[in-house]
Amino acid sequence: MKLKRLLMALLFSLGATLLTLRFALPMTAQADYPSDSGEEIFLPVLNALTPAALSPGLYIDKKAPPLVNAGEPITYTLTVSNVNISPLTNLVITDALPDGAFYRAPTTGTVILPGGGTACLTGTLNILAWQINTLETNASISVTFAVTANRTITNSQYGAAADGGFRAAGSAPVVTKIRHRIYLPLVMKPPPKINALEATQAIQSFDNRVRLIGGRPTTIRAYIDKASAIHARLYGFHNGAPLSNSPISAENGPLNLNSASTQDDLNSTLNFHLPDGWRDDLDFYVELTSPDGSQVYSRYPSDKKMSLNFSPVSPLEVVIVPIAYHHNGQIYRPADDYAALTDWTYRMYPLGQPLIVYSHAEYHFDGDLNTYGGWSDLLYNITGFRNQENPNSAVHYYGLIPTSSDYHLALGGLGWLPGENYAKKYLAAIGYDRSDNNYGSKTMAHEMSHNLGRMHVDCGNPSDPDPNYPYFGGVIGEYGYDIVEHILYPPAETYDFMSYCYPRWISDYTYEALYARRQLIAASSRAEETGESVKILQLSGRIEIEGTQGSLRPVQQSMGLPVAGEGEGLYRLELLDAQGNPRYSYKFDPQPIASEAGLAERGFSFNLLYQAGDSSARLFFGQNLLDEVDVTVR
Ligand SMILES: [Zn+2]
């Protein structure tokens, strides 16, 4: 109240030479900026005084930094000096804030200032005033306050007055320039967002059509717009509970992107490698963050979680039969690095774990592997092992052939191409062990894929290409991704590994088909009974001309599991008893061996229950006898 009374007195004493400003204090008191009444008061703007009205002996000076950053405080210091021979009483210092300066905007009210002053603030005019009771002779007093501004401000309306008519006005405008920081586009633009997510394990479409396999290493790619210094983290949940190690960071962040993420550039997406134990059904969301993760820009999906469903698959088991190849009086043996051999099958197939490999006793072979017939014979022999040892399982058998510069091999690989009805009867193939360019490993993947019902894909002129293959020229059609080397395979320049072209990877078509066939085999394996090992006759043979010419191979007797029931098909195997009477008949359809190098055949291989006295076996097409062999055990 004392300040107001003084200001009123000051105003009236200055008379007509004074430019007056008039405003009302608010009627409503605020808790933190108390105002005691709604009285109207008037404040002088002292620099508008004419020079004649000024009194010597009272000086005011104002200082401010010439340059500050936008948003940083500008600190003003007002200094008043008394050079009179007597003290000054009831000294009032005032400062009208210039346009563009904000003291405590948009607050309206009376503010107690540092140093005992009061600020009267309105939305359009801010005047600060300080009252000092006494200023001694030759003394100075300083008051300070700070404002912020976003543009250059010029403060010229400041002054002081005291009892006895002493007055001073600011003699020089105080200019402060504002330096605007150079903002990164990141800050100026809306926060960066994820546009899409892709989860890949070998091959994937942009809309995630290809199924995910339980347990298989999984990479999630987050597609974002052009952004600088952008990182990301992924929060994983299973059945609502956070997974251990959650959240995980993008393995290639932070990124600086000059343009939006694209599918063809692995380093244009923020990529997450899901940890072990996260490859079961997964709920997750992703946050885009600053490089150190302290700032979160956006989240995807914005308010819920994404779900990934993983299809469980059984492991692929393979028995590898090393072929001890007799050639020109020497024995050659294949390389035994089975991890390298099976590597490409694991990389490309829909498998949740590396192959389970069993080493078979080596098999001595002295046929001629420089001929198709030699390869075909060896394949029947390996198939015989499988039928004898694991006839009702999903286990593959693979004969591994040594490579040497001492001889030529007619083929790289050969395998059965069974139809669905024989899906698990012909899981047998053979192939060479070449390690250069991983030919041996890629050949194994190719031949076992034949065993799983995959025909050739039309590139490089293979025999019998699959008429249903969806992509022209045998390309893989979608982006492939190698979970071991973490590289991409472009859709139009990579060929399905069931073709003869390079570079090779797996198409989504082959991937889904392999999954479906393995599911069929797994279901059929579960349905079968294992039974006891009994005496069997291993009957196998070739169909040279469909319906009219076929031959039985030499019959082996051993212990094993026989086929059950009477079978189904146009061909028939018949066992004759000691009297030469038919005692058992098994119907079937021969299955193709996948044609490599243009050579093809159809054949069969079955275990039939042996009974003492069995004398011979016959091969029929309908009622036509095609061949007969002696099965007498001597
Ligand atoms: Zn093939």
Image: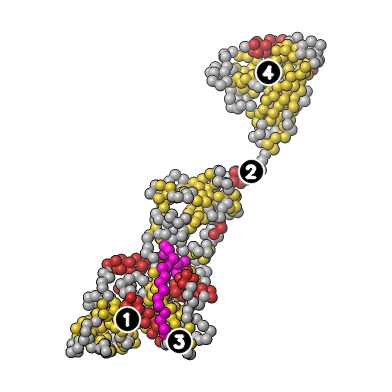
Q: Nearer the viewer, mark 2 or mark 4?
A: 4
Q: CA distance from mark 2 to mark 3?
A: 76 Å
How dense is the environment of label 4, judged by Cα within 10 Å: few (below 14), some, or many (20 and up)? many
- Picture coordinates of residue 228, whole percent (x, y): 60, 50
Determine the image quadrant of residue 171: top right
The structure residue drawn at horizontal position 22% and vertical position 75%, both measured from the top left corner, is 565
Query: Is tag 4's residue or tag 1's residue first in the polypeptide sequence?
Result: 4
Q: CA distance from mark 1 to mark 3?
A: 26 Å
Residue 238 sits inside the magenta stretch: no
Q: Nearer the viewer, mark 2 or mark 3?
A: 3
Front-most of residues 217 and 60: 217
Residue of label 3? 326
**Residue kind at label 4, given as amino acid type:** Trp
**Residue kind at label 3, given as amino acid type:** His
The structure residue drawn at horizontal position 66% and vertical position 36%, both measured from the top left corner, is 70
Query: Is tag 3's residue or tag 4's residue first in the polypeptide sequence?
Result: 4
Residue range in magenta is 345-365
Query: Is tag 1's residue or tag 3's residue first in the polypeptide sequence?
Result: 3
Query: Can residue 464 be spotted in the picture?
Result: no
Residue of label 1? 604
Query: Is tag 2's residue or tag 3's residue first in the polypeptide sequence?
Result: 2
How dense is the environment of label 2, judged by Cα within 10 Å: few (below 14), some, or many (20 and up)? few
Front-most of residues 612 and 41: 612
Instruction: Give the SS element for disc 3.
Output: strand
**Residue kind at label 2, given as amino acid type:** Tyr
Instruction: Give the SS element for disc 1.
Output: strand
